[in-house]
């Protein structure tokens, strides 16, 4: 009999990377199983939280799925390959 264990993902840090006058970048560092991972999202200057939070959620879900993890820890589903939080900008 094997016991299935869950990976626990910890958000370690989030940081605005503000070096471009036209673009905002937000970096998120996460840890799981003693390893560190990072995702970065970018968009037009002065992004609002209802824009960058879903983008970070989607990026974190994609990274977790790529590592073989369960994206439901960030509220996502791996039902299909076209995961989208549903409210990213079209362009």
Image (cartoon, helix red, strand yellow):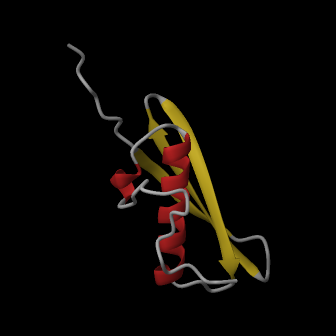
Residue 45 place in picture, x, y as percent: 69, 84
Residue 44 x %, y %? 69, 83
> Could you say which is closer to the camera, residue 11 or residue 18?
11
Asked if residue 69 lies left or right of residue 29, the reply is left
Query: Which residue extends farthest front?
Result: 80
Instruction: Name the residue nearer the viewer: 61 or 31.
Output: 61
Residue 11 at x, y = what percent? 43, 50
In the image, residue 75 above or below residue 52: above
| Quadrant of the frame with the N terminus | top left
Residue at point 54%, 56% (across, down): 81
Q: Residue furthest top?
A: 1
Residue located at (63% from left, 66% from top): 41
Q: Residue at x 38, y 57 (%)?
A: 74
Identify the image quadrant of residue 40: bottom right
Give residue 89's position: percent from left, percent from top.
Answer: 61, 83
Count of marks placed on residues:
0
Q: Nearer the viewer, residue 58 or 28?
A: 58
Q: Looking at the image, is 23 positioned above or below residue 28?
A: below
The C terminus sits in image quarter: bottom right
Q: Residue at x 42, y 56 (%)?
A: 79
Relative to 58, say whether 4 is above or below.
Answer: above
């Amino acid at each position: 009999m094997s016991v299935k264990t869950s990976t626990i993902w910890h958000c370690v840090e989030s940081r605005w990377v503000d070096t471009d006058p036209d673009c905002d970048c937000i970096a998120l560092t996460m840890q799981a199983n003693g390893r560190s991972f990072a995702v970065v999202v970018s968009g037009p200057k002065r992004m609002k939280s209802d824009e960058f939070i879903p983008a970070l959620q989607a990026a974190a879900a994609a990274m977790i799925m790529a590592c073989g993890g369960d994206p439901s820890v960030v509220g996502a589903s791996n039902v299909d390959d076209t995961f989208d939080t549903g409210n990213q900008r079209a362009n």
